[in-house]
Amino acid sequence: MSLFDVYPLFDITPVKGEDVYVYDDKGNKYLDLYGGHAVISIGHSHPSYVKNISNQVSKLGFYSNSIQNPLQTKLANKLTELSGCTDYKLFLCNSGAEANENAIKLASFHTNKKKLIAFTNSFHGRTSAAVAATDNTKIVAPVNAQQEVEFFDLGDIIGVERSLKKGDVCAVIVEFVQGVGGLGESDAQFYEKLDQLCKEHGTCLIADEVQSGFGRTGDFFAFQKYNIEPEIISIAKGMGNGFPVGGILIHPAIKASYGLLGTTFGGNHLACIASLTVLETIEKESLMENVFQIYSYFLQQSSSIQKHAKVKGRGLMLGLEFDFPVKELRSNLIYKHHIFTGSSKNPNLLRILPPLTLKKEHIDDLFDAIKSELS
Ligand code: PLP
């Protein structure tokens, strides 16, 4: 059986990872500034991660959500401690799309409404309602298109308000720093007004922190730069450092009842231990402080190529927007300089989504490589 051919692949086969590096089957070493698409948060094969997951799997790898699993409570408590999101409840699932799907469903149950508001250049995943709220018609199948979604440009508060006033919107879903769409962001005035309008009109604000959460922007969540209180926060990617895990943080105003949400694999023992280890490591190794320091070094060093590229994003959710399409540059960085970077919907944007353990010397390696390609 051959594989269903949906991914354009680089001709590289990684077989080993260590912190910010991956090694291929020929022994070549690559600097991983892509982090497997913003997934690797505490570094590849972090010793505590390997040890804790190995210990757990040797005891109990999985049991369903029909028994007591104290690891889920331990994870929820640690998440409260690091995020500062006190009083929220945690529901665990397995991926970013699934987190958003549950977030949207819960908003609809809670408000008894069914329309969604989303934004230009959004990406929320490939499942039913999540993909309908994604600004890419190519990945929305006819069966998904029945979900009613109104799209607005980020910053268009007048349009959003006009729509919310009709009273039929269950949720506004937003990435506070857009990922796949190309690192678009609005400002405090827009986000704070958006939060206020959602509260006035009985609509849930869903903060999609799947990519930007777990310290990637230097704050635990990207929305925490603003004075807002989302009803639901969705998480995944960096949460498990590669172990598939996702979840939603739910405001106490939204009440649970048996059977309202559910999943077989969500919150299993291995997923919990993976995510707990991520949180403990973020704390122990002061990774959020490291993100701020490396971001500020990145900004300084980027001045050496400012004629060609502008910095977008924040923390270690970054991009360099060049005045030309970056496809060839990205390919040269991989094959000639052994540096992985990411792409986005914007063809001129090179994305940097490394493990949060990145050091200044790695930023130097990137800019040296870019400068040699530009010269
Ligand atoms: N939301 C955002 C902001 C994302 O960037 C992604 C994936 O890139 C998703 C949701 C979907 O996550 P997953 O691929 O785990 O379903």
Image: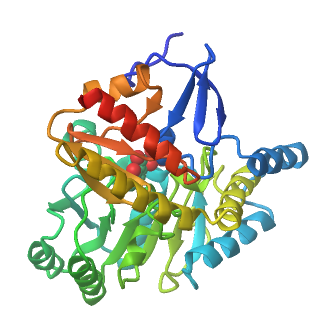
Residue 15, picture quadrant: top right
Measured along the vertical axis of the image, is residue 281 above or below residue 51?
Answer: below
Residue beneath the point at 28% across and 47% down: 304
Residue beneath the point at 35% across and 78% down: 111
Residue 134: where, in percent of width, then height?
27, 51
Residue beneath the point at 55% across and 66% down: 288
Residue 331: where, in percent of width, then height?
34, 24
Residue 236: where, in percent of width, then height?
52, 55
Residue 108: in sight, yes or no?
no
Residue at the top extreme? 1
Of 127 and 257, the residue lying toward us: 127
Total labels drawn = 0
Measured along the vertical axis of the image, is residue 232 above or below residue 337?
Answer: below
Residue at the right extreme? 59
Rendered-image quadrant of the N terminus: top right
Residue at the bottom extreme? 200
Residue 311: where, in percent of width, then height?
27, 53
Rendered-image quadrant of the C terminus: top left
Q: Is residue 312 left or right of residue 278?
A: left
